[in-house]
Image (cartoon, rainbow, N blue to C red):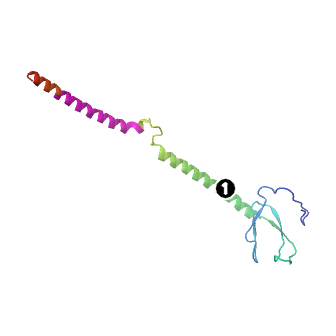
């Protein structure tokens, strides 16, 4: 299709080359372009039946102040994103630096090993006590003196 400014558009539109209408029904509408530049807006208004308005041609361009604000917003959002990412990484590192990652890590098995040593010592003490009782019973049965 050829527009009133002589431009012809065919095929797919450029990436990020559109605009969003804020309201397409009612007495008032507006649009917000998504990239800096000049836009041509042709609006055809109709009552839904037969009456239509003449086409309106509007040129929209962004001012230098708007471009500067967009650049500042982009820099700020990048800095904030990087800061939040680094904060998340540091929190994960801080939270996990003393957590054992492997089941055989000494930090994970230290308390288990201590409990096992204590248990083995108790078992050995009970075994020694039983062996001593058995030995004393056999000695008494033979009639030997202590």
Q: Is residue 48 above or below residue 99?
A: below
Image x and y of residue 5, in percent: 90, 65
120 left or right, relative to 94: left
85 left or right, relative to 49: left
- Residue appearing at x 66%, y 55% in the figure: 75
- Image quarter of residue 122: top left
Main secondary-structure element of the magenta-colored stretch: helix
- Is residue 14 part of the magenta span, yes or no? no
* Between 77 and 118, the one nearer to me in the picture: 118
- Residue appearing at x 70%, y 58% in the figure: 71
Q: Is residue 6 above or below residue 130?
A: below
Q: Secondary structure at mark 1?
A: helix
Q: Quadrant of the N terminus?
A: bottom right
Circle 1 residues within 10 Å: few <14, some 14–19, many ≥20: few
Q: Is residue 91 above or below residue 105?
A: below
Q: Residue furthest front?
A: 141
- Residue appearing at x 53%, y 48% in the figure: 90
Image x and y of residue 18, in percent: 78, 61
Image x and y of residue 145, in percent: 8, 22
Q: Which residue is mark 1?
A: 75
């Amino acid at each position: 299709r050829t527009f009133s400014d002589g431009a012809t558009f065919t095929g797919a539109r450029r990436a990020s080359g559109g605009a969003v209408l804020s309201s397409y029904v009612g007495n008032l509408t507006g649009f917000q372009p998504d990239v800096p530049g000049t836009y041509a807006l042709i609006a055809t208004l109709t009552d839904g039946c037969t009456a239509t308005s003449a086409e309106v041609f509007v040129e929209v361009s962004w001012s230098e102040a708007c471009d500067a604000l967009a650049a500042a917003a982009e820099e700020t959002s990048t800095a904030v994103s990087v800061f939040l990412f680094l904060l998340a990484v540091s929190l994960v590192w801080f939270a996990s630096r003393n957590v054992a990652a492997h089941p055989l890590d000494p930090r994970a098995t230290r308390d288990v090993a201590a409990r096992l040593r204590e248990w083995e010592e108790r078992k050995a003490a009970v075994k020694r006590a039983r062996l001593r009782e058995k030995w004393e019973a056999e000695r008494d049965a033979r009639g030997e003196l202590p």
